[in-house]
Image: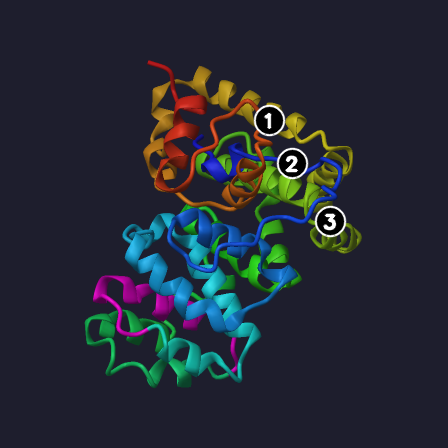
Amino acid sequence: MRLPAAVLIAVMLNTPPVVAAPPAPSTAFSQPEHILRWINNYRQKPEPDRLPEAVKAMTALGVLRELDSAGVYVGFTAGVLGANPAKAERLVTAMFPMRPEDQVLIVRAIAYSDLPGWKELLRKFVERMPARKVLIERHLFGQAPTLMELPLDASPAALDALWGYYFATGSAKPIRRILTGLPWSREPNNVERLTTGSMIKLTLAVNATRDQELLWILKDEVQRQPREIAGPLRQVIEAAETYETGKIRKQAMAAIDEIKRKGSADFRNWNWWGQAGTTALALGCVGAAALGQVQFGLPCVIGGALSTAAVKYLGPQE
């Protein structure tokens, strides 16, 4: 099981507030971590008008080259568009010009935005993205899934995109979708689902330690969810409230050890999970790294090296 580094490289910001005024934030997205920091803090100070600037920086910095590892960016862009229907067309227009290979972000962000008229919005940009005609048509004709329809065990990008949408909006909707995979954390036979379920459980717990609104959502949902979800969700809530997320990580490690004992054939999807680069908890890593609070004993690396660090820590040993 290869958990994306977002799951493994988690940092709790649990120190007392600093009295001195913090330094002024950078006004430019000159590095990938600047984008991640902005995403991380977005709900405290929403700046939808800066989205085109951020997207252009994503392109310039190359973080969209492997879209399977850019799910957070896609989901976040979709969330900002969805939360700002009156501005959506103007925001998308300002993202151009864009390299054809990076235009996938625009197509998917519009399709994942949950805007009532997202298809009409997408049609307005068909002529500006001729290289993406096939992908656009797949979304317009219902041949490609929306964000809430993405299979959670098909790619790490699906979970990342759901988290990205949450980071932009604070909506419970993507969290409810994430919860549907939580029972897989107890999956005894299917490696892909065990991987996904363990990742979901840990991302929920660690993010909830630093996001009170998320914790409230989880507490509300535990009363509504069926037993197979409510059981592990209670463990998530307890871990978040007691800051004992290490227990969940140990459970994931135990599951990995069990799979190791089954033989190498069960590791067929480790390289697949290694696609994950900038993932959900990388944002917490960025924020804490800036304050020197990396304290989990796991490597905290920015950008595409994240999954490499995770693989070295949890991957099959030679």
* Residue 106 painted magenta: yes
Assess whether residue 97 is covered by the magenta stretch: yes
User: Which label lies toward us, 2 or 3?
Assistant: 2
Residue 304 picture location, percent across and down: 35, 41
Report which residue position mark 3 lands on.
215
Seen at 20% across and 76% down, the residue is: 130
Residue 213 spot, x, y in % from top left: 72, 55
On screen, 79 above or below 11?
below
The residue where tag 1 is placed is: 295
Q: CA distance from mark 1 to mark 3?
A: 22 Å
Magenta residue span: 96-116
Question: Would residue 135 appear left or right of 117 to someone viewing this image?
Answer: left
Residue visible at 42% across and 82% down in the picture? 90
Reading the image, the residue beneath label 2 is 12
Q: Is residue 251 left or right of residue 273?
A: right
Whole-angstrom CA distance, mark 2 to mark 3, is: 14 Å
**What residue is at 73 percent from the left and 45 percent from the top?**
230
Given the image, on which type of amino acid does mark 2 rest?
A: Met
**Helix, strand or loop status at disc 2:** loop
Label 1 packing within 10 angstroms: few (<14), some (14-19), many (20+):
some
Q: Secondary structure at mark 1?
A: loop
Q: Relative to 288, say whether 88 is above or below.
A: below
Look at the picture and state if 27 lies above or below 50.
Answer: above
Tell me which amino acid carries mark 3: Leu
Residue 248: quadrant of the picture: top right
